[in-house]
Image: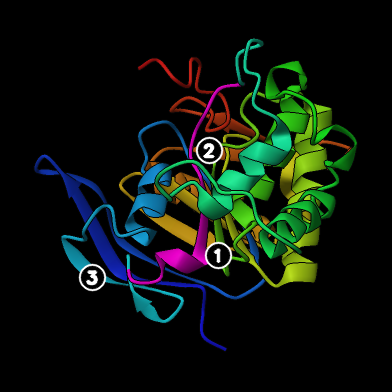
């Protein structure tokens, strides 16, 4: 099977500065992959490289068997965001529909007979479990409900690869786990590979197939239990890092520099 994403000895530079280098990883179809690391380590940069928005200074990247940017029609992308303002009146179903026809000019014309696009919109809304509130204005919905509809928008064109940039950032722990379970189910039933950028692995740890951790100008990739270890993180950070496991299975990372899962204000810009 053609991997969803292949990165080989890749290096990215921004304004002459190396963001990361010697990064190699493979994401298989249907895999649920979290991308972790401190602020500025290059997590979102990986998504932009996969979309062809940032060129590599060195190395190679293949997306769904093609050069980066060539297969974007088969990629669903959810960028970083805040919650919608309470005054937002657009309905959830309309937001999802924009994933199909938002690139078109003009006002949609009424259709005669069956509308296969409308059927696909409703099918995708059902897939993410958003049917009870899809016809309500977005401004009236909770953060978790809005996030499900945004994921539906990214899924409505049946992508083979789904890129989610910090979709859990504004959610409480309960909703973070619910969204992670939803994403895992999508991976299993739809065969979609998912790269999800996150700050804390604990709410999603039990759902992941793979973890990519950026730090120290490079990255490591493997199963969560292979990557989140004292040895691996100490090597990445170039400083003593200790990984502890609590009785309930949560991982706690301590040491210098600042513990990787505690970064203060995440969006200072």
Please give the name of the residue rendered at 82% of the width and 36% of the height, measured from the top-left corner: 246
Please name whichever residue, 80 or 109, is drawn nearer the observer in this view of the structure: 109
2 or 1: tag closer to the N-terminus: 1
Marks 3 and 1, how far apart at CA: 21 Å
- Considering only vertical position in the picture, is 210 above or below 20? below
The residue indicated by pointer 1 is 161
Give the vertical position of 55 relative to 262 (above or below). below
Most extreme residue toward the front is 112
State the SS at label 1. Answer: strand
Q: Residue 57 placed where, x, y %?
A: 16, 60
Residue visible at 46% across and 59% down? 220
The magenta stretch is: 70-83
Q: Quadrant of the C terminus?
A: top left
Q: Which residue is mark 3?
A: 59
* Relative to 1, residue 47 above or below: above
Q: Residue at x 30, y 60 (%)?
A: 52
């Amino acid at each position: 099977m053609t991997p969803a994403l292949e990165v080989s000895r890749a290096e990215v530079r921004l304004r002459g500065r190396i963001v990361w280098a010697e990064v190699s990883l493979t994401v298989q179809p249907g895999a649920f992959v979290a991308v972790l690391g401190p602020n500025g380590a290059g997590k979102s940069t990986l998504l932009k490289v996969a979309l062809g928005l940032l060129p590599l200074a060195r190395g190679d990247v293949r997306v769904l068997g093609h050069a980066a940017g060539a297969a974007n029609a088969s990629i669903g992308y959810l960028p970083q965001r805040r919650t919608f303002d309470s005054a937002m009146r657009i309905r959830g179903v309309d937001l999802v529909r924009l994933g199909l026809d938002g690139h078109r000019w003009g006002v949609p014309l009424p259709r005669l007979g069956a509308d296969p696009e409308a059927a696909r919109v409703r099918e995708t809304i059902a897939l993410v479990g958003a049917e009870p509130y899809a016809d309500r204005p977005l401004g009236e919905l909770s953060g978790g409900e809005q996030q499900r509809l945004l994921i539906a928008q990214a899924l409505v064109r049946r992508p083979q690869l789904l890129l989610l940039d910090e979709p859990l950032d504004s959610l409480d722990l309960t909703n973070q786990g619910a969204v992670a379970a939803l994403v895992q189910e999508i991976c299993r039933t739809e065969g979609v590979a998912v790269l999800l950028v996150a700050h804390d692995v604990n709410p999603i740890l039990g759902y992941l197939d793979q973890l990519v951790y950026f730090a120290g100008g490079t990255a490591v990739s493997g199963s969560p239990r292979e990557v989140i270890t004292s040895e691996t993180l100490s090597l990445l950070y170039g400083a003593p890092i200790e990984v502890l496991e609590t009785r309930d299975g949560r991982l706690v990372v301590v040491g210098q520099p600042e513990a990787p899962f505690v970064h203060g204000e995440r969006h200072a810009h």
